[in-house]
Amino acid sequence: MREIGLFPLGIVLLPGERIPLHIFEPRYRELIGECLAQGEEFGLVLSDEDGRRAIGTTAAVVDVLKRFDDGRLDILVEGRERFRVIEETGGRSFDTARITVLEDEPGEPTSDQVERCLAAFRRLAAAVEVEPEEPEPGTAGLAYWIGARVDFGPDAKQELLELASERERVVRLTRLLGRARELFRFTRTARERAQGNGRVEPPG
């Protein structure tokens, strides 16, 4: 168990994912300043109208993109490890907590499960007319790799983060990719039919 500073946001950071952050609040400028000075990580946790989640991702600052004269920062962070908040602590301007790192349970996806997931990813890419990147089948962290490249929204990404094995994540991600493709096709069809006063039923 160790104590880290927490950065609650309305987004989810997956292990291995890189995202830019704009740091403007004084308390988080203090947190990020300490992380930069001491080479430490902080904890990014999803926080929304449903509250703050107990499971998040440790994050490391891998680049300072811009420093502003008033102290604000644009940084690039990378997700490292899943963690669970064990106990919230105090005494700082920013939130802190004792955490424990979460290790994956045994359970690798089968080759068929990996192929189905990759096929669903390619079908979604084709539907939105983009050229997909191609990870090697069986690569460790495939679910996180794909999850970082598709905008599922924070709830779905949090669900992936909380699953305890790569097999569970790959199976769930395959369903999410299929659902995303259905919703995209529905939205496009609805837009086309609306132009002609048509009607289309949303997918069930």
Image: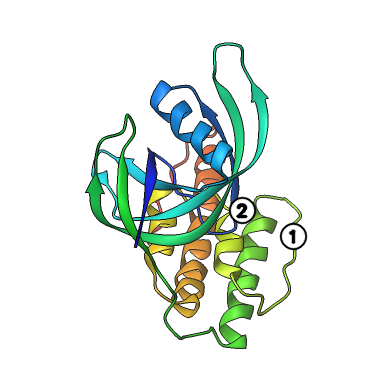
Name the residue nearer the viewer: 104 or 181: 104
Q: Residue at x 42, y 22 (%)?
A: 25
Q: Residue at x 39, y 60 (%)?
A: 83
Residue 24 x/y as whole percent: 48, 22
Q: Which part of the image, by quadrant, shows the N terminus? A: bottom left
Quote the CA–CA distance across marks 2 and 1.
9 Å
For residue 172, above or below residue 79: below
Q: Residue at x 36, y 46 (%)?
A: 46
Mark 2 neighbour class, 10 Å CA radius: few under 14, some 14 to 19, many 20 or more: few
Query: Which mark is drawn over residue 133?
Result: 1
**Of pointers 2 and 1, the one earlier in the residue sequence:** 1
- The image shows a total of numbered marks equal to 2
* SS at circle 2: loop
Name the residue nearer the viewer: 141 or 37: 37
Name the residue nearer the viewer: 191 or 132: 132
Amino acid on which the number 1 mark rests in the picture: Glu
For residue 146, above or below residue 117: above
Residue 189 x/y as whole percent: 54, 46
Amino acid on which the number 2 mark rests in the picture: Arg
Query: Which mark is drawn over residue 149?
Result: 2
Determine the residue located farthest toward the top in the rendered image.
69
